[in-house]
Amino acid sequence: MALVLMVVHGTDGDVLPFVAVGRQLLARGHDVTILTHAYYQSAVRAAGVQFVAVDTLAQYEAHLADAAVQQHSQDISDFREHFDRTGLADQLRFECAELIRRHRPGATVLVGAPLTAQSVLIAGEVTGAPVVCLAQSPFQLMKLPGVAWLYDQVLADRIDAARAVHDLGPVRDWTAWMWSADAYVGLWPEWFDRAGDPAPPGTLLTGFVLGDDDQPVRLPPQAEKLLRADTPPLLVTGGTGRLLQPDFYRSATRALAQLRHPALLVVRHRDLVPEVLPPGTHWFAHLPFRALVSRVAAVVHHGGIGTVARALAARTPQVLLADGMDRPDNAARLAASGLGRALAHGRWTPTAVAEEVRAALERPPAPQPPPAGDGAVRAAEAVETVLTGSLTR
């Protein structure tokens, strides 16, 4: 039995796949601890995995709001100010200290995500434990050199200060350092990889990890009533975060007004929802997508990898209004495979969005590729490969 220490940041599409992989590792007899946001305490503990909060609920919400404000800035110094305003330097030091304190010599593996694995890489250097990076989407590996450059330009002193606490010298080659994990695992299937720039050689692809497979499936009575109506509703969602174009929900709801089609609008943050919704459109803060997506006529969404994977698993038509982060790449891969329709941000007029939704409803998507198996199981096997291969560098 080994100790697996996992660190992950972000929203549902980032965190819940790690929880799913952690659950599989736990079932295989390993001790598993996940360090993540306080918001995910119940999800982690429900999986039977040990939980360590890297922030408070208030700090997490403040971070989401601040990230939304600075996401489209063209001034890289704004990223440094965001890092400082939201206390990420303190969080980095805390994560490093916890990983090093919990480490068991010769019996520990560290797991992080490629773009945010700084604490995992530092702890790996200090302890000699192997490091595995789980990438939730191809974008995370494609953009790693660019993010390494950004850290070198504006955050080198902050990260080097966290290293110095543990008697590590400054990073000399940021790209090499961020590529220094012992294994890189892509949580997507081979057909999705081939639909765009492929993953770097040596990346193990597992298939999609459905992070909500253990989530509750009971729907609230109002949603259940709407789903049982003669016309199945559309599902419109921008995910669980705030990193969206300001006009995402406005464009989507104005398209709904043209379509005159019933819809469920699932948005965690009420302030993102337009004050006036079209007739037949109903807002919910949360709904279990595992129970919902297979019962709607189509999903209109932001292009997050978790929503992409869930809609594919349900064979439900998708229309992606994708902008920012990995979403345009996810949308392009889906469209190239004939499995979804995508509309770039400059074309988000109500009429254009409505036309894409009509087309998705009238023309079913291409036949699905065969499933790659349970991505969470294959990802857990990949971590075990590192564990059984060599537990020290």
Image: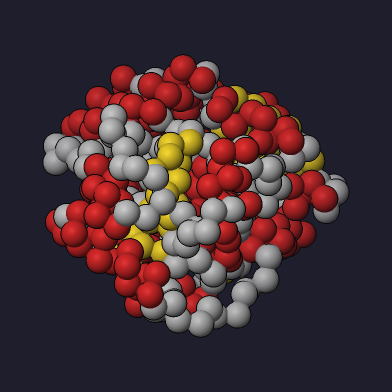
- Rendering coords of residue 216 (x, y %): 69, 42
- Rendering coords of residue 108 (x, y %): 72, 43
> Would residue 213 appear left or right of 117 to someone viewing this image?
right
Residue in the picture at 58% in, 66% down: 313
Q: Quadrant of residue 248?
A: top left
Q: Quadrant of residue 361?
A: bottom left
Task: Answer whether residue 97 is visible to the viewer in this image.
Answer: no
Total marks shown come to 0
32 over 177 or under it: above or below: above
Residue in the picture at 25% in, 66% down: 355
In the foreground, 366 or 53: 366
In the foreground, 114 or 389: 114
237 over 336 or under it: above or below: above
In the foreground, 375 or 297: 297
Name the outermost residue toward the front. Answer: 230
In the foreground, 260 or 179: 260
Residue in the picture at 20% in, 54% down: 350
Residue in the picture at 28% in, 33% down: 276
> Would residue 19 appear left or right of 73 to someone viewing this image?
right
Task: Answer whether residue 241 is visible to the viewer in this image.
Answer: yes
Q: By what rule are the colours in the image chosen? A: secondary structure
> Would residue 6 appear left or right of 113 to someone viewing this image?
right
119 over 206 or under it: above or below: above
156 over 231 or under it: above or below: above
- Rendering coords of residue 51 (x, y %): 68, 30
